[in-house]
């Protein structure tokens, strides 16, 4: 399959027009006319994932996080870009486009938190261009109602769904939760939206110290731990959409931080 045709499929899953203006998404490295038979999906394009891509002989790495956000000057990650170019490995990033999209990172996180689908809505709805209607219910973050239960039950549910042994919690585990807001990754800028939506708890990847003291209970998983399960699910959706292309999820991708 030509890379150019494959990119059209990826854009259907997470349209790049959804991405934040500051973001670095889309095809970052690669020849659109190249043939692709193997794809590796990952959250981060780290040194370990780059080694895995070489070992598996993939022609495309779909990395949720762009390896770099700004122009390359001098940085350790620049070597990974150069190596990808030399080996003919294309790099593609979805990042905030997937955060906004239906069935993306935020919708996945809300779903595993038990948010009622009928009540689910974005914390910050996506506003497209005039004259171009967009699907309802897309945007940054998600918020909605859940069956009333102690915060401790929600924490246990999230740890199981995200395959985590530990998370950070601010607030009493006995507090009854009826409304949940989520923001995958670094969700601080959406905390105010969650509070205005009267969320009892805010589920995110990471949050600043003082934000955790604003009165809304918080569950923080570490940044990419709030995204990885959704990106793994994305790999399955990509595989289902690409006949004749082998799609795998990285075995070496992991959050750079660990609880010890």
Image (cartoon, rainbow, N blue to C red):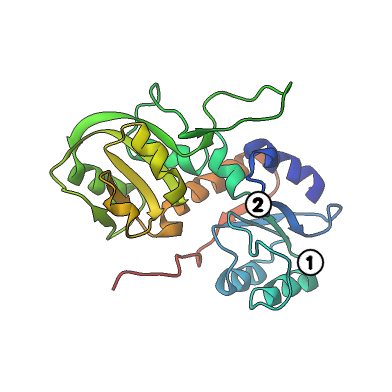
- Could you tell me which residue is drawn at 74 percent across and 64 percent down? 89
Q: Is residue 31 above or below residue 230?
A: below
Q: Left or right: 191 with respect to 214?
A: right
Q: Is residue 165 left or right of residue 91?
A: left
**Above or below for 36 versus 141:** below
Residue 121, horizontal then vertical, whole percent: 45, 28
Residue farthest toward the left in the current orientation of the protein: 174
Horizontal and vertical percent for residue 155?
25, 48
Asked if labels 2 and 1 touch by Cβ distance under 8 angstroms, the answer is no
**Circle 2 SS class:** loop
Between discs 1 and 2, the one toward the N terminus: 2
Q: Which mark is residue 228?
A: none
Q: Nearer the viewer, residue 222 or 61?
A: 222
User: In this rendering, is residue 130 above or below 124?
Assistant: above
* Towards the viewer: 49 or 192: 192
Q: CA distance from mark 1 to mark 2?
A: 27 Å
Disc 1 is placed on an element classified as loop
Please report the residue visible at 67 percent of the width from the left and 47 percent of the height from the top.
Answer: 21
Instruction: Residue 187: tell me if it is visible.
Output: no
**Where is mark 1, residue-wise?**
88
Q: Residues within 10 Å of mark 1 (few under 14, many from 20)?
A: some
Q: Residue at x 81, y 54 (%)?
A: 35
What residue is pinned by disc 2?
A: 22
Measured as percent of width and height from the top left, residue 215 is found at 25, 45
Q: Quadrant of residue 129?
A: top right
């Amino acid at each position: 399959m030509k890379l150019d045709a494959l990119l059209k499929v990826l854009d259907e899953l997470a349209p790049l027009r959804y991405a934040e203006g500051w973001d670095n998404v889309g095809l970052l490295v690669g020849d659109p006319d190249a043939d692709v038979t193997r794809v590796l999906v990952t959250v981060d394009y780290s040194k370990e994932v780059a080694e895995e891509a070489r070992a598996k002989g993939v022609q495309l790495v779909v990395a949720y996080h762009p390896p770099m956000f700004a122009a390359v000057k001098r940085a350790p990650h620049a070597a990974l870009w150069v190596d990808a170019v030399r080996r003919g490995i294309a790099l593609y990033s979805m990042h905030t486009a997937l955060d906004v999209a239906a069935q993306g990172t935020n919708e996945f996180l809300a779903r595993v938190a038990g948010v009622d689908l009928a009540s689910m809505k974005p914390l910050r709805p996506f506003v497209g261009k005039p004259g171009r209607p967009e699907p309802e219910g897309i945007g940054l973050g998600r918020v909605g109602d859940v069956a009333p239960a102690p915060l401790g039950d929600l924490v246990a549910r999230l740890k199981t769904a995200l395959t985590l042994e530990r998370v950070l919690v601010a607030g009493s585990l006995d507090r009854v939760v009826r409304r949940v807001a989520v923001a995958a990754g670094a969700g601080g800028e959406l905390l105010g939206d969650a509070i205005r939506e009267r969320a009892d708890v805010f589920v995110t990847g990471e949050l600043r110290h003082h934000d955790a003291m604003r009165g809304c209970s918080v569950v923080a998983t570490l940044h990419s731990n709030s995204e990885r399960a959704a990106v793994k699910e994305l790999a399955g959706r990509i595989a289902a959409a690409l006949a004749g292309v082998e799609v795998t999820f990285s075995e070496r991708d992991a959050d750079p931080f660990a609880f010890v």
